[in-house]
């Protein structure tokens, strides 16, 4: 009889963006809503920007997915919130989609990116992101979606990071302090705010990455 050695399968090394964030995939998200209560108030817009890491280890915005959403049945629409955002939920030119459709369309490329990068879970990046995550989790519950790619409670907060890097916690001020352009007339759109937040997050992370490299030299 011959002894057959058991072949031990070794896991490939964790590299790229998965290694940088402990197998979490940062995905930048912004939502626009008809109030502050995620349990009762309507989710009106959602946008998500995927990030990619280049060969130098720097983050860059890759692609944004954005949808206008039809208020769920029985949703509360706070007039002061609608006045603040300038959103008319029933404007026919908004081309509203259902929560279920929008979430599935947003989650699909995130799941593909998780698989491609070897990450285990997406982590929401946002400006005061608990707000955005609460509304997403509430909508996931209403739509009975079983595979939410986002971590249930962990987030990256650009308000905190902006305060650390630039001494500014308001998104517009942190963006301008980082050398970014800011258009007040475009603000409070989920797509615009998401892409600006993504740019801010990348600049802060890349700035830190540069400091790390300089310290090693």
Image: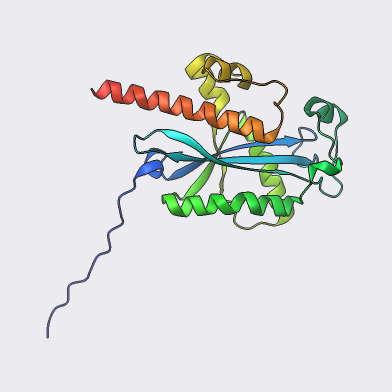
Residue 7 appears in which quarter of the rendering?
Answer: bottom left
Vertical side of 178 occupied by 36: above or below: below
Q: Position of residue 188 (x, y in %)?
A: 71, 28
Front-most of 59 and 130? 59
Q: Position of residue 37 (x, y in %)?
A: 77, 36
**197 on left or right of 4:** right
The C terminus lies in which quarter of the figure? top left
Count of numbered badges drawn on the protein: 0
**165 on left or right of 80:** left
**56 on left or right of 136:** left
Residue 189 appears in which quarter of the rendering?
Answer: top right
Q: Position of residue 164 (x, y in %)?
A: 49, 18
Residue at left 85%, top 35%?
88
Q: Position of residue 151 (x, y in %)?
A: 55, 45
Residue 29 appears in which quarter of the rendering?
Answer: top right
Residue at left 85%, top 32%?
78
Vertical side of 98 occupied by 129: above or below: above
Residue at left 60%, top 16%?
173
Residue at left 48%, top 18%?
165
The N terminus lies in which quarter of the figure? bottom left
Vertical side of 75 occupied by 145: above or below: below
Vertical side of 213 occupied by 22: above or below: below
> In this view, which residue lies farthest toward the front?
93
Front-most of 122 and 92? 92
> In this view, which residue lies farthest toward the left?
1
Front-most of 191 and 72? 191
How are the residues colored?
Answer: rainbow
> In this view, which residue lies farthest toward the bottom?
1
């Amino acid at each position: 009889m011959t002894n057959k050695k058991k072949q031990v399968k070794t896991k490939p090394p964790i590299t790229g963006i998965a290694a940088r964030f402990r197998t979490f995939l940062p995905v930048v998200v912004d939502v626009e809503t008809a109030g502050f209560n995620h349990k009762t108030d309507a989710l009106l817009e959602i946008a998500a920007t995927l990030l990619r890491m280049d060969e130098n280890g720097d983050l860059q915005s890759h692609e944004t997915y954005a949808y206008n959403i039809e208020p769920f049945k029985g949703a509360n629409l706070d007039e002061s919130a609608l006045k603040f955002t300038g959103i008319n939920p029933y404007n026919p030119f908004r081309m509203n989609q259902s929560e279920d459709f929008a979430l599935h369309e947003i989650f699909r490329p995130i799941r593909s990116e998780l698989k491609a990068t070897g990450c285990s879970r997406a982590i929401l990046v946002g400006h005061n992101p608990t707000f955005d995550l609460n509304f997403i989790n509430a909508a996931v519950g209403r739509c009975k979606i079983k595979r939410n790619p986002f971590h249930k409670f962990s987030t990256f907060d650009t308000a905190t990071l902006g305060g650390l890097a630039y001494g500014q916690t308001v998104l517009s001020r942190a963006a301008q302090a980082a050398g970014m352009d800011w258009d007040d007339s475009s603000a409070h759109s989920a797509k615009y705010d998401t892409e600006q937040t993504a740019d801010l997050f990348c600049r802060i992370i890349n700035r830190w990455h540069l400091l790390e490299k300089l310290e090693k030299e």
